[in-house]
Image (spheres, helix red, strand yellow):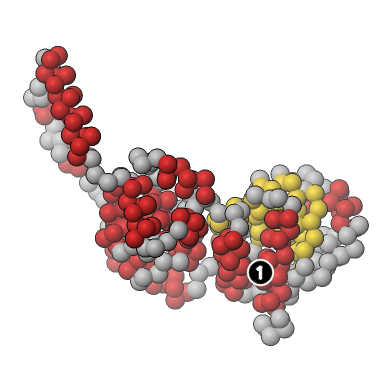
Amino acid sequence: MPFSIIRNDITKIKCDAIVNAANSSLLGGGGVDGAIHRAAGKGLFLECMKLHGCKTGQAKITGGYDLPCKYIIHTVDPVWRGGSHGEKELLQSCYRNSLALAKEHGCESVAFPLISSGIYGYPKQKAFDIAVDVIKEFLKENDMDITLVIFDRASFELGKDYSDNIREYINQNYVDEHTDNSRRFGFAGKSDFRSAPTAVACEDSVAFSDDLKFVIENQIDESFSEMLLRKIDEKGMTDVQCYKKANIDRKLFSKIRSDRLYKPKKETAIAFAIALELSLEETKDMLMKAGFALSHSNKFDIIIEFFINKNIYDIYEINEALFSFDQKLLGA
C-alpha cells in the first residue's frame, strides 16, 4: 500500500528506511531518537559523530546497523512554541527532506514516526495533518510505500467533534446479527437433505453440465475489472490518477487491468469506489461485482457509508477515521 498507518514500535519495522526524529546533535536523546540509537547500536553513534549535527527541518542519512532497515534518515524536528515561530514550515521540511533523501537513495519503502508530536509538544492532530498533506503531495508524483507509525493510542486521536459524529452514526445504524445459520441459508433441518434427489444419470449430468456452461458463458454479468475500467473512462480519469487516488499500488492495478475476472479484497474494491467518487448505490454495485456487500452489522461498512453520504471522498481522511476506530484501511 502506498500510504498506511499502523500502531507499532518503529525500531521493529522492516523497510528500506526509517525516519528518526532527532535532536540537532544527531547523537541520540529521548523518545524515538533514543529508542532508535539504542536499538541500532554503537555503529550508529560513531557514524553520526562524523555528520557534525543537522539544522532544524533538514535531514541526513546513515546506515541502519542493528535495525531491520537499510537506512536511517535523521531529521531535526521543531519545538512547538505556539505556532507563530515557523513550526509548520519546519515540520513540512522535515517530511519533504526525508522523502527526498529516501528517493535519492532508491528506497521503495520508508516509515515515519509522528514527528514533533512527542516531547517537542507539537499538537498531535496538527502534526498528523501536516504529515498526511506532505506525504499525499509526494505520492502524486512518486511511487513509494510510506508508513506512518503510531506508537500507541494516546499518540493519535481524531478531533472530538468529528469522532463523535462518526460514533453517533455507527450507533444509529449498527445492528447485531443473531441470525441462525439454518435460516440464513434456507435449511429447515436435516430432513431437507434426506428428501434431496440421490443420483442423476450420467448422460443427464453431462447435458446439465453443457447447459450450465452455456448459461455461464452467455449470461455472465460485467465483472469488477470491467466495471472499474468503464467507470475510469466515464469519469475522464487516467489509470494513474485513479490508482493513486485509491491508495493502490501500481503493480496491483496492472493485475486488475490484465485479468477481467480478478477478485480484489473488499478494502481494495471500496478504495476504487472512493477514488471514483461513486454514490452509495454505485458503490454497492461495484462491491457486488467483487462478491461483497455493505452491511449495518459491520462498523467498517458503516464508516464507509458515513463518508459517502457526506460526499467526502478523500481516502486519507477516511483512513484516518478507520484507523482511529481500529478498522482496516482502504487500499491494497
Neighbourhood count class around disc 1 (C-alpha, 10 Å): few under 14, some 14–19, many 20 upward: many
Please say whether residue 197 is visible from this viewpoint: yes
Q: Is 194 drawn above or below residue 153 in the view shown?
A: above
Please say whether residue 119 is visible from this viewpoint: no
Which corner quadrant of the image does residue 189 belong to? top left
x and y percent of residue 228 in the render? 36, 52
Residue occupying image coordinates x 41% and y 66%: 313
Left or right relative to 156: residue 326: left
Could you tell me which secondary element the residue under label 1 belongs to?
A: loop
Q: Is 179 drawn above or below residue 309 in the view shown?
A: above
Left or right relative to 156: residue 78: right
x and y percent of residue 42 in the render? 86, 48
Left or right relative to 1: residue 260: left
Which corner quadrant of the image does residue 18 belong to? bottom right
x and y percent of residue 13 in the render? 65, 48
Q: Residue at label 1?
A: 117
x and y percent of residue 205 in the render? 15, 19
Residue occupying image coordinates x 49% and y 53%: 248
Left or right relative to 28: residue 10: left
Which corner quadrant of the image does residue 153 belong to? bottom right
Residue occupying image coordinates x 48% and y 60%: 241
Instruction: Residue type at mark 1: give it.
Output: Ser
Q: Is 196 drawn above or below residue 48 in the view shown?
A: above
Residue occupying image coordinates x 42% and y 41%: 258
User: Residue at the top extreme?
Assistant: 202
